Image (cartoon, grey):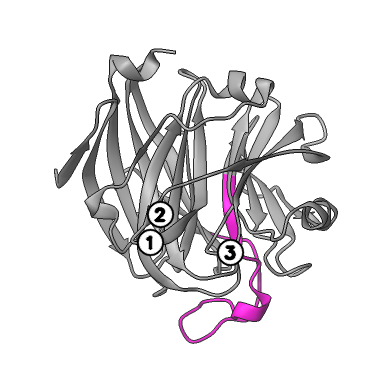
Amino acid sequence: MYFSTIIDNKMKLELLQSKIFDNIPSGSGIEKWQDKIYIIGDDSNFLYELNNNWDIINAIRLFDRPTDNNQRIIRQIKPDLEAVTLVPPSHLLAFGSGSLPEVRDVGILLNLASQDELEYLNFYDMYEMLRSITSQVNIEGACNVDDKVILLNRGDNNHSNQLIITNWNRKQLNIEKQLDIHFLDLPQIENINTGFTGCVHLPETDVMIFCASAEDTSNGYDDGKIKGSLLGVMQNFTTQIARSDIKITEIIVPEFFKGKKIESVCIDEFIATNEFTVLVCADNDDGKTELMRLHIALSDAFFIK
């Protein structure tokens, strides 16, 4: 079903479909592999597997931590998986936010092809290195770009947004502790700073898509009133990170994101060089997850360097 359209001079964004899941708590990360959709929750013991009809067909257990009556992991001990990406050959890599040292300095690496190869990761050393450089660690987005994994450190009312470039070791299937950090400015929504929440890279066009939301909070641990979210794009992304001159090409703040905390974005279908669909998930701090399908069309002006 068609809902709404936002157009600017370089990009057209349409909301095609939306569904709220009462039984997927706190959706924080989304990826699509082959014909399946995978959603993680920052306070869930499970990774949820959906088919193309958006039916939940499997719940893969990741943790076995105590939960409340709503099956949400108790806040003080939740791993807070917030950033997720696909890495070769068929693995889902997820990062804890790091917003609570040691408790949230965790990650998982799951082979989606078999679903029985699950490895638990410890990012404490890398996050401690970040803590010595930045004022706050709150990793919310990740995407795989060739031999790099890009991490997004979320800003808020008191902290800046950062794009972090790390080296991905394909043979060892791990992150090497070499970091390149870039500070990026994002616009406000209703006078509240927006902070990174997710990203995905399109190798076909070398475009990076990211999402960010405005939440009235001064730190990465406490929730705040949600004002809305935005979607942004960066062109020639591999060239930009190689030159260390990273710029945002375009940002849209759609009305249908108003009051929603968009947490993650992934590619749904690549249609053409300037046209594709993406999936985003929203966690509005009520224990539910909203899934949306968006259509993005880029004008010729977008590709002019």
79 part of magenta stretch:
yes
Residue at 23 percent across and 44 percent down: it is 15
Q: Position of residue 104 (x, y in %)?
A: 70, 65
Above/below status of 36 relative to 192: above
User: Mark 3, residues whose alpha carbon is within 10 Å: few (<14), some, or many (≥20)?
Assistant: few
Q: Is residue 84 visible?
A: yes
- Position above or below: 73 against 265: below
**Disc 1 vs disc 2: Cβ atoms closer than 8 Å?**
yes
Q: CA distance from mark 3 to mark 2?
A: 13 Å
Which residue, as the protein is rendered here, is positioned at the far front? 191
Query: Mark 2 belongs to which amino acid?
Result: Gln
What is the spatial separation of the Cα atoms under label 3 and label 1, in whole angstroms? 13 Å
Mark count: 3
C-alpha span from label 1 to label 2: 5 Å
Q: Residues within 10 Å of mark 2 (few under 14, many from 20)?
A: some
Q: Circle 2 — which element?
A: strand
Q: Which residue is label 2 attached to? A: 188
Q: Give the image quarter of residue 182.
A: top right
In which quadrant is the C terminus drawn? Answer: top left
Residue 108 location (% of width, % of height): 69, 53
> Residue beneath label 3, please?
158
Amino acid type assigned to the residue bearing label 1 in the image = Asn
- Amino acid type, label 3: Asn
Q: Is residue 109 magenta?
A: no
**Residue at 67 percent of width and 36 percent of height:** 149
Q: Residue furthest bottom?
A: 69
List x then y, in percent, for residue 201.
51, 31
Residue under circle 1? 191
Label 3 vs 1, first from the N-terminus? 3
Callout 3: helix, strand or loop? loop
Q: Which residues are magenta?
A: 60-84
